[in-house]
Image (cartoon, rainbow, N blue to C red):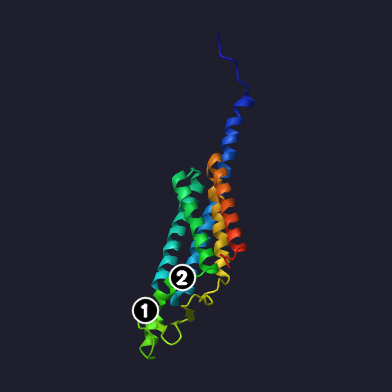
Amino acid sequence: MSAPAIAPEILAVAPATEARVGRSLSRWLLLGGLGAGLAGGLHIAVAVDHLEAGELAVGFFLLTAAAQLGLAGWLLVSSLTRLRPDLRLVSLALLGTVALIGLYVVAHTTGLLDAFAVHDSAGHGAHAVSNHVPGIDPVTGVDYSTGIAIRPGGPVAMSGEVAAAQHAPGILGPVTVAAEVLLIAALAALLPTTWRRRTVNGLLGLGGLAWVLWFTGVLA
């Protein structure tokens, strides 16, 4: 018994579907590469803007920029070749980007990172002040009479009050976050359907948690 004949139009469906999937994959890879490249370049600008914050902050921003620029190159090359990237690397990049946005929110809405800023600045600005002004701790830069740490950008309350941040978000911060949101959307689109659904649900859950923390005053 001979095999049933298959209509030519049916045979043409598979190549057409593969071409459409390939174009969609290339588009998301391109958008992800652009988002990662923009975020990496902006992090270099942020590092320059935070030079007085000390080596720890500058080094973190530069390492982040290097990682994002490397990710951008990888995604753009994958876009040209239309090869689906390793899902483990896509997931790792997505989690890292979400963590960066979370760190940004914490840094600009709470005082949890103030200790790192004070410690890093003490060795550069506060220590220099203590050499000329008596009554200031040479290690932390704390004025013994007021309990306030002197730093290049102004005083930081050490008695539980949160002083104004040395660096307001300005324009660089929100634009960098916007580029990272674009990157997250592109990376999520590269995941399989089941993973993508769980990822979106997880991101929505994090957004809801952030709103609750803001509403309760944890995030100012």
Question: Height in image: 33 above or below 110?
Answer: above
Percent x, y for residue 121? 41, 77
Question: Height in image: 2 above or below 14?
Answer: above
Give the Cα distance between marks 1 and 2. 19 Å
Question: Height in image: 215 above or below 23?
Answer: below
Residue on which disc 2 sits = 47
Q: At numbered mark 1, what does the secondary structure look like: helix, strand or loop?
A: helix
Name the mark nearer the viewer: 1 or 2. Answer: 1
Percent x, y for residue 98? 51, 56
Q: Quarter holding the C terminus?
A: bottom right
Rate crowding at label 2 as few (under 14), some (14 to 19) or many (20 or more) other CA atoms within 10 Å: many
Q: Quarter holding the N terminus?
A: top right
- 141 relative position to 26: left or right: left
Residue on which disc 1 sits = 123
Q: Residue at x 51, y 67 (%)?
A: 107
* Image-quadrant location for residue 8: top right
Number of marks present in the image shown: 2
* Picture disc at residue 111: none
Percent x, y for residue 60? 42, 66
Q: Residue at x 51, y 44 (%)?
A: 82
